[in-house]
Image: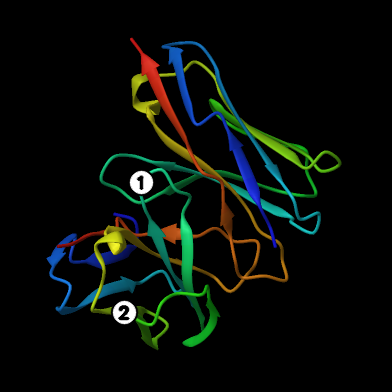
Amino acid sequence: GENVEQHPSTLSVQEGDSAVIKCTYSDSASNYFPWYKQELGKGPQLIIDIRSNVGEKKDQRIAVTLNKTAKHFSLHITETQPEDSAVYFCAACHSSASKIIFGSGTRLSIRP
Amino acid sequence: ETGVTQTPRHLVMGMTNKKSLKCEQHLGHNAMYWYKQSAKKPLELMFVYNFKEQTENNSVPSRFSPECPNSSHLFLHLHTLQPEDSALYLCASRLDDRNSPLHFGNGTRLTVT
């Protein structure tokens, strides 16, 4: 079955700097890759997603890149702000399955 | 407001109790999910329902019993739980489109004493 690995498990960056979180997946049939942000006391919330027919997608300060050949995808947050502090999860899914498999999460802290 | 509502937000129960978790969505979605989130572990899929039919049971012990009476409501019935079942239980929904995202509720924090 699908396996998703996520690194790093914790990340601390200075406010204003960029943060990068990386994931790898095992099932080459996976074609949908969402990213979620989970704040304290809340459920995960979708922040951006990418489908396998594109290599990059941007939404303001957030971007996601996908390398299908290497089975890697990454989340990039630029100009980080205190409200970016949270736990971030990557996930992978393929169209013939109802399962979305999550990575183990990255706790991002933004230092003032 | 996420569109997916879970009740109660917090629950403390003894190992001999029976309780139920409730999830409700008004997003027009037709697939509903239960996930378990424990400290320092990935989100663990428990059950999936599509159009009220259970399509996934991820080897979950029988002390957890799901119920999906319609596409908008999902329950998780709990009985004779163990302390290691203490966790955040998250409900999610999505369209029956395998390239659509999950929408999560804010979870029920369960403590088994």
Horizontally, residue B44 falls left or right of residue B37, namely right
Nearer to us in this view, A104 or A57: A104
What whole-number distance in Å separates the C-alpha atoms at marks 2 and 1? 23 Å
In the structure shown, which secondary structural element does the residue marked by tag 1 occupy?
loop
Whole-percent x and y of residue A89?
51, 43
Chain identifier of the residue bearing label 1 in the image: B
Which residue is drawn at the image coordinates 46% and 54% (left, top)?
B43
**N-terminal label among 2 and 1:** 1
Residue identifier under label 2: B75
Q: Would you place residue A2 above or below residue A61 in this image? A: below
Horizontally, residue B16 falls left or right of residue B78, namely left
* Tag 1: amino acid: Ala
Q: Quadrant of the N terminus of chain A?
A: bottom right
- Image coloring type: rainbow
Whole-percent x and y of residue A90?
57, 44
* Tag 2: amino acid: Phe
Which residue is drawn at the image coordinates 30% and 72% (left, top)?
B23
Which residue is drawn at the image coordinates 47% and 22% (left, top)?
A11
Whole-percent x and y of residue B5?
28, 65
Which residue is drawn at the image coordinates 29% and 54% (left, top)?
B1
Q: Would you place residue B46 above or below residue B52 in this image? A: above
Q: Would you place residue B70 above or below residue B21 in this image? A: below
Residue identifier under label 1: B39
Name which quarter of the figure residue B106 lies in.
bottom left
**Disc number lying in front (2 or 1):** 1
